[in-house]
Image (spheres, rainbow, N blue to C red):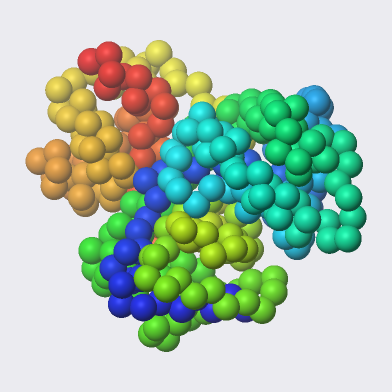
Amino acid sequence: MLRIHFTPEDLRRTRLAEGPEPLWEILLSLHKLTDGQGRPVFDGWRRRVRSRPSAWSRDLPLLAPPSGYSPDFLTPGAEAGCLDAGLDQVLSTPREHLRRDLARLAPGRRPGGPAAELAGGQLGGLRWLGQALRDYHAVALAPYWDHVRSHVLTDLAVRRDELRRGGTARVLASLHPRARWSAPVLELPYPADRDLRLDGRGLRLIPSFFCWGTPFALCDLDPFPALAYPIEHELGWLGEHRPSEQSLHALLGRTRAKVLAAIAAEGGCTTSRLAQHAGVSLASASQHATVLREAGLIASIRRGGSVIHTLRHPGHAVLRTS
């Protein structure tokens, strides 16, 4: 069980991430690559990634064992938002932190291979880490980032709606089916028994596509405490979407462009909020969303009694060129 202790200041400073965090998805997907969990959701992805081995395949998974501790420096607490910014944070980790985290990863053992240079803060070790993370991302995440992003933004839209309805306490209580909020403590299922005291720093909540089963928290008292939590998945997320010429032609029109822009402005919204923002009826908003979805410009996922619409990368491209 993980018990997170909040002060009033922590509740005020707790915030949702803006979108998927590439470095967190790298680490948590490395866990999924080897732990065998979530087979109906991740087995197809595992087969594709394993069919493209590269220089990262031998040593990088050793830094992210499927259970137990993973080095904190792999998941920066400060928000990055893109791969390059996240890599800059990782590669700027102070030498003593690298040494400390790697010692905790393998207590009583001297690291070997690239990890030995990394533990010493040597330039060769840092270059290896940066290239390995970049190569792994290109194989395991970049081809699927559209799906990852859509699912994460859908979850964030749900959380923002909960925040509007019931404040931070409601968001915390809904992070996991077994979450229990009893002010000032949030209890969550966790592989180990642990207390995390925020001491006024607040908490950044990161919805993660590759987080599975239980949340994942930084081990140390980082200046920017963060908690990754699992989101809902669809079994067919690996399927390719190829918009038809008919769908793209049906997309044209001022009102539909307004609907698309409303989804972009909200970062993900329900059909009812979409109708409000676009100034159309609920039935019209639903119809326009269907056309946009069939054209591959948005993703629509049902959550409870609502359907959440988020922008896909082709949708961004249409808005940029319109």
Snapshot quadrant of residue 25: top right
Quadrant (top left, top right, bottom left, bottom right) of the C terminus: top left
Identity of the residue furthest to the left in this view: 279
Indicate the position of residue 242 as horizontal and vertical percent values.
Answer: 50, 21
Residue drawn where x is 20% and y is 50% of the image: 273
Residue drawn where x is 69% and y is 71% of the image: 191
Q: Is residue 168 visible?
A: yes
Please tell me whether residue 159 is drawn above or below residue 18 in the rendered image: below
Foreground residue among 277 and 83: 83
Please tell me whether residue 145 is drawn above or below residue 37 in the rendered image: above
Indicate the position of residue 150 as horizontal and vertical percent values.
Answer: 44, 40
Indicate the position of residue 149 as horizontal and vertical percent values.
Answer: 47, 39
Foreground residue among 135 and 302: 135
Count of numbered marks: 0
Indicate the position of residue 239 as horizontal and vertical percent values.
Answer: 59, 33
In the figure, is residue 146 to the left or right of 39? Answer: left
Residue drawn where x is 34% and y is 25% of the image: 316
Residue drawn where x is 54% and y is 48% of the image: 76
In the figure, is residue 228 to the left or right of 257? Answer: right
Snapshot quadrant of residue 166: bottom left
Q: Is residue 60 visible?
A: no
Snapshot quadrant of residue 118: top right
Identity of the residue furthest to the bottom in this view: 182
Quadrant (top left, top right, bottom left, bottom right) of the N terminus: bottom right
In the figure, is residue 216 to the left or right of 85? Answer: right
